[in-house]
């Protein structure tokens, strides 16, 4: 029998066996298993992300009632850029990976990303530096210690360890303060401006207590909001306070809801900005110490210091607003508008607004005097001052008239603020501008236009006690 056909048949049989063995072999785990979810958690249910290890040490961002906060042991809480936090939670919730087997050539775990959800579950991801070729392998570690290893495409190591959570911080200087500003203080040495919001209305509390100009305060708040941090984590100055720095304090009152066993908790959240020296050689940036404090509204509560971080800020927005107290005084002497004034008492004479005009006692006031009273009401309640001094003892240049004391009341008889009324003084200044001073509530407001001067001179006549009652009008009996 020829041996060649036998050998060929044997070789074919061997090839068939080898091919069958290869085709029917069990598939490897890494090849047969496609991408699968790494985390069984929704983006909206993630409440905190924490990075442990790496060069930056412990860093954490967590969801708060007003957004996301960056937290670390070495700096105060700071708001996180909302877009970054949302993107990170979405990437993690959608993260897909291919299970991989143990590989002795894998790099060691460099840092751990801990994800906590709203149900209190904690899942850890061990992050490695990408291997040569960009291969990224992570370890998922459940709370029971179970470990699963995945190859992923997302650059988690670069985002959470290489860049770091500190880069997520919002550049706004008010990013560390939760809630709506309810108090602002500007201080330098003995000089102090204290502004406070009570039931939605701003007032000046220091250096005097008086009504405030809401538009000026809004300009100040907008300037503070526009200030941006250009560099975080600057080194502190060698001697803080040695050059009598400006200090800006902003406060917000925050209420934390309680539950069935605990009542709501109220606290004052305070941000103190200390403006130190220049932070760069050009002088454009200023080194600012940002300190966060918390003071709970409870008996015996103490101020809790939450830390200080030094940042470099361009203060240009503050250069566009007034920083001295008189820039925040209300521009009108009385609160409200002229239509709210139902009566005016000038010295010992009282004029009452009626349906047809003004009256003194039982007699109607002549038309010219009624027009003067209307003009006086406008001057006091609606006319913006030309200038202001924080004193009720003015020392004007020129010859002052005797003051006319004025108390304005509403239709219910309530005195319009200031409760003690105001005084009108006409200043005659030969060779220079004459004007009118309205003094009250610790403030002297100045009016220099001709119309106001005419109203002031008419007020002197209306307040004269020896001028007798108003002249009878036709038809009076």
Image (spheres, helix red, strand yellow):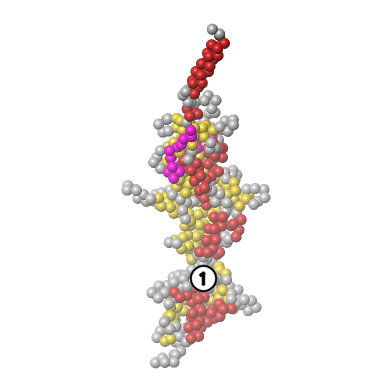
Quadrant of the frame with the N terminus: top right
For residue 475, what is the image quadrant? bottom left
Q: Who is closer to the viewer here, 344 or 178?
A: 178
Q: Who is closer to the viewer here, 417 or 136?
A: 136
Task: Determine which residue is flagged by label 1.
Answer: 332
Residue at horizontal 48%, vertical 29%?
32
Q: Who is closer to the viewer here, 144 or 17?
A: 17
Residue 53 belongs to the span the image colors magenta: yes
Quadrant of the frame with the C terminus: bottom left
For residue 433, what is the image quadrant? bottom right
Residue 437 belongs to the span the image colors magenta: no
Q: Who is closer to the viewer here, 413 or 285?
A: 285
- When the figure is inspected, residue 340 is found, relative to residue 286, above or below; the finding is below
Q: Please tell me whether mark 1 sits on a helix, a strand or a loop.
A: loop
Horizontal and vertical percent position of residue 87: 51, 44
Q: Residue furthest right?
A: 282
Looking at the rendering, the stretch of residues picked out in magenta corresponds to 34-54
Horizontal and vertical percent position of residue 60: 49, 41
Horizontal and vertical percent position of residue 464: 49, 83
Residue at horizontal 34%, vertical 48%?
259
- When the figure is inspected, residue 142 is found, relative to residue 183, above or below; the finding is above
């Amino acid at each position: 029998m020829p041996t060649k056909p036998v050998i060929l048949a044997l070789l074919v049989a061997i090839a068939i066996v080898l091919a069958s063995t290869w085709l029917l072999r069990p598939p490897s785990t890494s090849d047969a298993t496609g991408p699968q979810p790494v985390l069984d958690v929704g983006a909206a249910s993630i409440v905190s992300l924490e990075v442990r290890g790496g060069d930056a040490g412990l860093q954490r961002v967590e969801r708060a009632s007003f957004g996301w906060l960056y937290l670390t042991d070495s700096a105060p809480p700071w708001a996180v850029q909302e877009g970054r936090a949302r993107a990170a939670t979405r990437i993690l919730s959608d993260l897909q990976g291919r299970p991989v087997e143990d590989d002795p050539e894998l790099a060691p775990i460099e840092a751990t990303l801990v994800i906590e959800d709203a149900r209190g579950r904690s899942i850890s991801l061990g992050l490695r530096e990408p291997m040569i070729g960009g291969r990224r392998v992570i370890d998922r570690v459940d709370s029971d210690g179970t470990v699963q290893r995945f190859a992923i495409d997302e650059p988690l190591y670069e985002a959470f360890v290489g860049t770091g959570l500190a880069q997520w911080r919002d550049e706004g200087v008010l990013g560390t303060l939760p809630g709506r500003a309810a108090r602002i203080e500007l201080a330098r040495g003995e000089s102090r401006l204290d502004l406070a919001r009570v039931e939605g209305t701003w007032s000046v509390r220091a250096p005097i207590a008086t009504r405030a100009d809401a538009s000026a305060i809004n300009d100040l708040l907008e300037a503070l909001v526009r200030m941006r941090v250009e560099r975080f984590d600057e080194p502190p100055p060698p001697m803080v306070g040695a050059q009598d720095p400006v200090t800006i304090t902003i406060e917000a009152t925050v209420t934390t809801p309680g539950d069935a066993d605990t009542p709501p908790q109220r606290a004052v959240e305070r941000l103190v900005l200390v403006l130190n020296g220049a932070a760069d050689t050009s002088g454009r940036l200023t080194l600012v110490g940002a300190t966060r404090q918390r003071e709970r509204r409870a008996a015996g509560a103490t101020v809790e210091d939450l830390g200080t971080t030094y940042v470099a800020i361009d203060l240009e927005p503050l250069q566009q607003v007034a920083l001295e107290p008189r820039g925040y005084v209300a521009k009108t002497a009385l609160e409200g508008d002229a239509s709210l004034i139902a009566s005016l008492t000038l010295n010992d004479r009282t004029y009452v607004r009626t349906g047809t005009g003004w009256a003194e006692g039982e007699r109607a006031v002549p038309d010219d005097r009624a027009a003067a009273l209307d003009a006086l009401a406008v001057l006091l309640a609606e006319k913006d001052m030309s200038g202001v001094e924080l004193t009720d003892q003015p020392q004007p240049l020129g010859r002052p008239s005797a003051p006319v004391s004025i108390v304005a009341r509403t239709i219910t008889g309530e005195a319009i603020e200031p409760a003690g009324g105001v005084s009108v003084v006409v200043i005659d200044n030969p060779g220079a501008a004459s004007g009118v001073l309205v003094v009250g509530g610790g403030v002297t407001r100045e009016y220099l236009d001709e119309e106001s001067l005419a109203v002031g001179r008419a007020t002197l006549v209306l307040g004269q006690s020896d001028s007798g009652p108003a002249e009878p009008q036709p038809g009076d009996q």
